[in-house]
C-alpha cells in the first residue's frame, strides 16, 4: 500500500515538471494584420500591414453575426 502511494505521488509530481512547448523554429507569430503574404488569403483591396483597414474589415464582417441588432 505504501509503495502504491509513493508511486502515485511520484507520477503526480512528474506531471508538474513539464517543459514549456516552443516551436522548433524559435520564431514568434506576426501580428494578425501583417497578413500571410499569399494574395489568395487577402480580402479585396486590403494591404498587408494596414492595421486600421484590418480592424475595419473585421468590424464590417462581424456586423451580420451580431444577434442583438438583427430584426426578428
Image: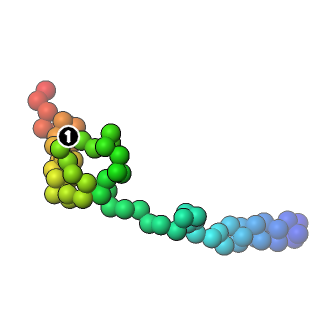
x and y percent of residue 36 in the render?
36, 51
Foreground of the two, 66 or 3: 66
In which quadrant of the rendered view does residue 51 lie?
A: bottom left
Count the marks: how many?
Answer: 1
Q: In this view, does 68 lie above or below 2?
A: above
- Work out which quarter of the rendered image holds the N terminus and state it: bottom right
Q: Which residue is drawn at 87% across and 71% down?
A: 2
Q: Is residue 20 above or below residue 72?
A: below
Quickly name the residue at label 1.
44
- Work out which quarter of the rendered image holds the C terminus and state it: top left
Task: Please state if 49 lies on the left or on the right of 14 as rendered.
Answer: left
Q: How is the image coloured?
A: rainbow
Q: Residue at x 16, y 57 (%)?
A: 52
x and y percent of residue 71 in the render?
11, 30
Asked if residue 47 shows in the view, the reply is yes
Foreground of the two, 62 or 40: 40
Q: Which residue is drawn at 76% across and 66% down?
A: 11
In which quadrant of the rendered view does residue 23 lie?
A: bottom right
Q: How crowded is mark 1: few (under 14 residues within 10 Å), some or many (20 or more)?
A: few
Task: Please state if 5 lies on the left or on the right of 72 as rendered.
Answer: right
x and y percent of residue 55 in the render?
19, 53
Task: Please state if 3 lies on the left or on the right of 62 as rendered.
Answer: right
Asked if residue 66 shows in the view, the reply is no
Instruction: Say which element carries label 1.
Output: loop
x and y percent of residue 8 in the render?
78, 66
Q: Residue at x 58, y 69 (%)?
A: 20
In which quadrant of the rendered view does residue 12 lie?
A: bottom right
Amino acid at each position: 500500500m505504501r509503495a502504491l502511494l509513493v508511486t502515485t505521488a511520484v507520477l503526480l509530481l512528474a506531471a508538474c515538471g513539464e517543459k514549456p512547448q516552443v516551436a522548433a523554429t524559435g520564431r514568434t507569430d506576426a501580428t494578425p494584420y501583417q497578413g500571410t503574404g499569399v494574395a489568395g488569403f487577402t480580402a479585396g483591396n486590403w494591404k498587408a500591414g494596414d492595421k486600421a483597414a484590418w480592424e475595419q474589415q473585421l468590424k464590417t464582417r462581424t456586423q451580420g453575426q451580431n444577434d442583438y441588432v438583427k430584426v426578428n
